[in-house]
Image (tube, rainbow, N blue to C red):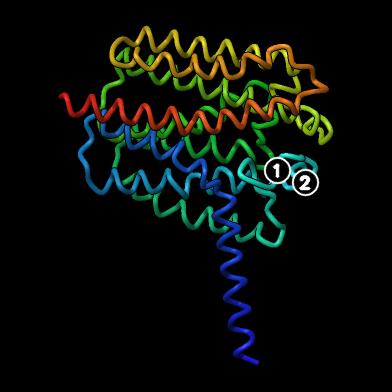
Amino acid sequence: MSTRTEPTSRAGLLTGVGQVLLASRPLSWINTAYPFAVAYLLAGGEPGWALVVGTVYFLVPYNLLMYGLNDVFDYASDLANPRKGGVEGAILSQRWHRATLWSAVVTNVPFLVALLVAGGLASGVVLAVSVFAVVAYSAPGLRLKERPYVDSLTSSTHFVSPAVFAIALAGGRFTMPVVATLGAFFLWGAASHAFGAVQDITADRGAGIASVATSLGARRTVRLSMAGYASSAALLLVAGAPAALAAVVPLVYLGSVAPFRDLDDDDCEDANRGWRRFLVLNLVTGFVLTQALLVAALRT
């Protein structure tokens, strides 16, 4: 009997680990680790344990906290959402909800303690704001994701705050070009979240979930997203060289969502085509920006 139980238990454990990892959205890991690592190095941070710990933290545990909480507390509405169940959002079996929550806590706490020790008051405050935004987005009683406009601002904070934290941790200066670049990143993130919410208008309204898109409707939300991308490009131009060269990036996203500017609420799910294109664009633009940064580093 023991020989039969052991393989079964091992298979169950592997399934649980796989479910928890899936809840962390591996496709999105780079979206938070990359801003931290690049900002840390550009701010003059020395390669060392703080860089490694921070990069690993924002690669996996941070995403497990962010998306794991979302999958657990959005379980009922996700079941009714036709696009959930793949790379765009797992439908996490209730069997693994408690394991996911515990895994998020257990993997986050050691990294957070280490990063607080590595930095000072300023970086600690930024890290606290970052983690609060992640938890408050999905957790019952807060649910910032259900507060129109605040939802997009909070979501953008999830991706910009690792870069802000990295600069503070490295002892970098928040000069006008740096602030303008971070502001452009923030507008890009808010615009992206708003557009992403368009495809869920019908599902969210059916589940009684409010969002920037359910509040404004498809057409106005897409146009707000376009304005956000345009403003992001303008801020990068204000930031001056070399950041100004990246102004073309948000314009590419603007062009990607523009075909949906007259979308009706009844056809909101058509925006999923644009969202899938957005996921691909993230990989392409990330690669291009990385090559540009490497070339700039080699020339200095």
Residue located 38% across and 8% down the image? 237
- Image x and y of residue 119, in percent: 30, 40
Near mark 2 (Cα within 10 A), the count class, few <14, some 14-19 or many ≥20, is some
User: In the rendered view, would you say 286 is above or below 218?
Assistant: below
How many numbered badges does the structure rendering display? 2
Residue located 51% across and 28% down the image? 281
Q: Is residue 273 visible?
A: yes
Q: Distance between the residues labelled 2 and 1?
A: 7 Å
Q: What element carries label 2?
A: helix
Amino acid type shown at disc 2 = Leu
- Looking at the rendered image, the quarter that the C terminus falls into is top left
Q: Mark 2 points at which residue?
A: 79
Front disc: 2 or 1: 1
Residue 84: mark in rendering:
1
Image-based side of 130 in relation to 77, left or right: left
The answer to the question of whether label 2 and label 1 lie on touching residues, with beta carbons closer than 8 A, is: yes
Residue located 56% across and 22% down the image? 190
Depth check, front residue: 8 or 286:
286
Image-based side of 121 in relation to 21, left or right: left
User: In the rendered view, would you say 240 is above or below 87?
Assistant: above
Residue located 29% across and 15% down the image? 242
Q: What element carries label 1?
A: loop
